[in-house]
Image (spheres, rainbow, N blue to C red):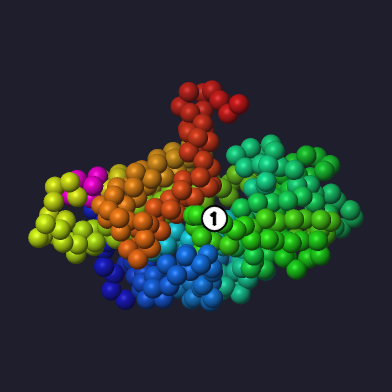
Amino acid sequence: MTFEPLASDFYGYETLLTDEEKGALAALRSYLESEVKPVVNGHWEKATHPDGIMKGLAGTGAFSFAWDETRPFENSAVFRGFVALELARVDASIATLVGVQNGLAMGSISVTGSPEQRAEWLPRMASGEIVGAFGLTEPTSGSDSAQGLRTTATREGDEWVLNGSKRWIGNATFSDITVIWAKDAEDGQVKGFIVPTSTPGYSATKIENKQSLRIVQNADITLEGVRVPESLRLQNANSFRDTAKVLRLTRAEVAWAAVGNSVGAYEAALRYARERVQFGKPIASHQLVQDLLVKSIGNITASLGMVVRVSQMLDDGTQKDEHSALAKAYTTARMRETVAWCREALGGNGIVLDYDVARHFADAEALYSYEGTREMNTLIVGRSITGFAAFV
């Protein structure tokens, strides 16, 4: 399949990809443009999940780009970043669905699971047979998850008993398994568990009335005496430091998704500006509209340079928490500016779904906050550059 570079990749970062990666990205783009883009506005408005989307995405290889049953990172981190960009360029909710499945759920098993657990679960998740969710955030614990988890895990023989609650868990209304992070009642350390959602005592309730990422089926999860065998405890998850290893890998891809969301808004605004005629000529020929578009492509280009570099650092083993944190904080802040400028370029039409910008504008707010708020990521970077922790 022919790969066409994005016009919004102004400095041509896609040229860093291999021919094989370009082909895979072209196939994904084709599927998104033909099967996903025509339906997302309708599903966004109704806050529904497209039937068959997980299987369809699995057919493009979207859930096996990052992991296989024995080894993480089959492809380059830069390629995986462009996958996240491509998904969010069409719809940030779809990018989130994949991020939860591929990055958080599969990532947890790949990074902290045993070889047997990776072999059992990852191929089935890569094929779309099994859908996963990631249960870390709680009703009273978000940014302070490292210390504030209230969900408990109590060992009883060869079983663990989980009690507690989780909130904002993506995919959780239809997932087959959820990776639950809980504090060991004995040693106080955070541990991870693969919990089949059919387990007695497990329940998930959809969060209603969201005004961002409306296609994502976020849920409140309740765990009441949920029993899981020792074989479903992630064998290499022994403290929150191990949880953080997963988040470090996925945080940078959220930064890529923020760039993709900006690209989607920019492309829609550019298309509109070329077609919309006022005062006898397309508004794209007006200086003030061009100013909005140039500021937008400037933000996109700067952000793309940052995420490409942070992904290269992941590939060469030099990326640290502060690097992904800076990328997430910076790109989501620039995204907020960009989608606002794109909405402005459309005037009144910028607030209706028909022109796509309104969806990207609203979805930006969720990307800005999840996987670490700007403030928390700022504190991670601040600790690195000053040597002082200022979290409390």
386 to the left or right of 34: right
Examine the structure image and report whether residue 15 is included in the region drawn in magenta: no
- Residue 57 as seen in the image, left or right of residue 227: left
The magenta-colored residue range is 290-295
Q: How many marks?
A: 1
In this rendering, the answer to whether 387 lies above or below 328 is above
Q: Residue at x 46, y 48 (%)?
A: 365
Q: Is residue 68 left or right of residue 298?
A: right
- Location of the N terminus by quadrant is bottom left
Q: Nearer the viewer, residue 146 or 359?
A: 359
State whether residue 62 is above or below residue 149. Answer: below
Magenta residues, dominant SS class: helix
Query: Residue 339: x and y, percent?
Result: 34, 50
Residue 318 visible, this orientation: no
Q: Position of residue 225 (x, y in %)?
A: 84, 56
What is the secondary structure assignment of the residue under circle 1?
loop
**The C terminus lies in which quarter of the figure?**
top right
Residue 292, magenta (yes or no) = yes
Q: Position of residue 214 (x, y in %)?
A: 51, 60
State the image coordinates of residue 139 (x, y, percent, origin top left): 67, 46
Residue that numbered label 1 is attached to: 210
Q: From this viewpoint, which residue is outermost toward the right?
A: 157
Which amino acid is tagged 1? Lys
Q: Quadrant of residue 227?
A: bottom right
